[in-house]
Image (tube, helix red, strand yellow):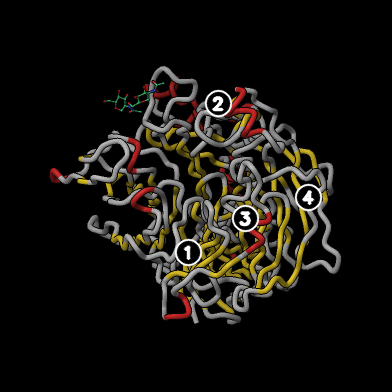
Amino acid sequence: MNRSVACPFLLFFLCFATVSPATASGGGQWELLQPSIGVSAMHMQLLSNDRVIVFDRTDFGPSNLSLPGGRCRNDPRDWTLTVDCTAHAAEYDVPSNAVRPLTVLTDPWCSSGTVSPDGRLIQTGGANDGERAVRYLDPCHDRLCDWEEDAAGLAAARWYATNHVLPDGRAVVVGGRSQHNYEFVPKLGAADAGAVSLPFLRETRDAEYNNLYPFVYLNVDGNLFVFANNRAILLDYKTNSIVRTYPTVPDGHPRNYPSTGSSVLLPLQPSGSEAEVLICGGAPEGSFTKASTQKVFVGALNTCVRIGINDPSPSWSVETMPSPRLMGDMILLPSGDEVLIINGAAAGSAGWELGREPVLKPVSYRHGSPAGSRFDVKTPATIPRMYHSTAILLRDGRVLVGGSNPHAFYNFTGVDFPTDLSLEAYSPAYLEAANSNARPAITGAGPPVELNYGKPFSLRFSVAAMSEKGVLVTMVAPSFATHSFSMNQRLLILESKPAAAADAESSLYVVDAMAPSSTFMAPPGYYMVFVVNGGIPSEGVWVHIQH
Ligand SMILES: *[C@@H]1O[C@H](CO)[C@@H](O)[C@H](O)[C@H]1NC(C)=O
Ligand SMILES: *[C@@H]1O[C@H](CO)[C@@H](O)[C@H](O)[C@H]1NC(C)=O
């Protein structure tokens, strides 16, 4: 059914105007959720209570979100405003579309994070008085949880570092400005206390840095894949030894900050032997310097590079995107067959006011299709999402998009790309009304379902039109998004049996699936599980897995 028909009469023209043009080209729809949440979504993390923690930077000056109860931050070290009674972090509740201010005291600018196995956000580093902070936030069901901070929780200052959750539930924190090393949080003992040297980060640092926010993935063999600048290693973090060295990408151009491409670990198959990394876009070498010193805004890279990291002789294959892009965000969609590339710009560099030519059209990449026919251009956005913008997957299958603040302050007027405080949702084509008959609905799942490694579990679902191809079960980790990279982003296709009718008359089915075999496949914590029918995912349910 055409959605505009369902609109109340008085809203007909409004609905018609917003829905119809948005569906006209390419697929997918945009919806403005909040014109302003008061802070700019520089960092975003979805928690298992369906709330998204959003924060920017304390040194921006006053935000548009007041701290409650006359609370103020008295920070003599703040670079802009030493007494600040506004919030720089907020909790966005997805089901009610409501925003609550949170109190972050030290500066989390350009920081990193993971969710611990118990569902707690563990966020690390930042700048100024926050560069060694470890901050914790519980996923509460009331409105009382707020940040707890340990201002000296890290061994080294971590600004532009990347985190990844490990099989034992700790997080590794890799790199950061002038940090050619990594460390672990939480610190369980003396062995965790210090930083471990990683010369690869010194070797990949160039005159523009270009190796910040490295792309880090937990490989299915338990080692860490670390991509920095234009090449990668496989690191055994337990012995601090390099297990494998991968070739330099074919064109040699940098992909990390400030050249800022984006990357994902492609969906993992149940066999657990293969793993492929995809990196898309970025800026040619020298772009940051040209933009910052000469105001010359070089065109972004228009390629993706892809590598099987466990292949006997790994090599990069190169594909051409429909258009150039840097500062894109890449999201693994729960259908398990598609990567969304969204946000960003077609020229310039990451860094203050160095991006030009916003790219409004998302692109989807179907990694399983034959090379040459993988890309598809989607319905364009209206709001440019430049430097400091983010995108994350929500449990209902939508993609939450926010941020864009290429300025050192909140600048709403007199600049090319004003500070943006809005939140939007991009709904991929699978959510269109035309797919409602094929959309499964998982029934009877309450609060997080407990899974056990390597053990079967069942999901009951209803669907009006069962696909001849049968159903897939996918499992997605909620990721920490900032600077065009989603840390801990991981999608598993679970082994499952053909779905069986539980009650043919009421379209009820049951699918038996196998939980991931090991913590190498799926580090402990909370995940969203989806039933996918002929490419159409259900709404996800939260599951928890831990030894
Ligand atoms: C933020 O507040 C300022 C000052 O009140 C106002 O001028 C500006 O329009 C607000 N911006 C947004 C995006 O709400
Ligand atoms: C951005 O905001 C800051 C702080 O309010 C102000 O000093 C600066 O002039 C603004 N920049 C522009 C280009 O308006």
Residue drawn at x 53%, y 68% as measured from the top left:
460
* SS type, badge 4: loop
* Numbered tag placed on residue 443 in the rendering: 1
Is residue 318 found left or right of 16 in the rendered image?
Answer: right
Q: Mark 4 or mark 3: which comes first in sequence? A: 3
Is residue 74 shown above or below 173?
A: above
**Residue topped by disc 2:** 20
Q: Amino acid at mark 1?
A: Thr
Mark 4 within 8 Å of ligand 2, using the beta carbon: no
In the rendered structure, which disc, 4 or 1, sits on the residue that comes first in sequence?
A: 4
Identify the residue under disc 3: 215
Q: Between residues 312 and 109, which one lies in front from this camera angle?
A: 109
Comparing labels 2 and 1, the label whose residue is closer to the camera = 2
Q: Position of residue 326 (x, y in %)?
A: 64, 37
Question: In the rendered structure, which amino acid carries the disc numbered 2?
Answer: Ser
Residue drawn at (76%, 52%) of the image: 306
Q: Position of residue 161 (x, y in %)?
A: 52, 55
Q: Which tag is nearer the camera, tag 3 or tag 2?
A: 3
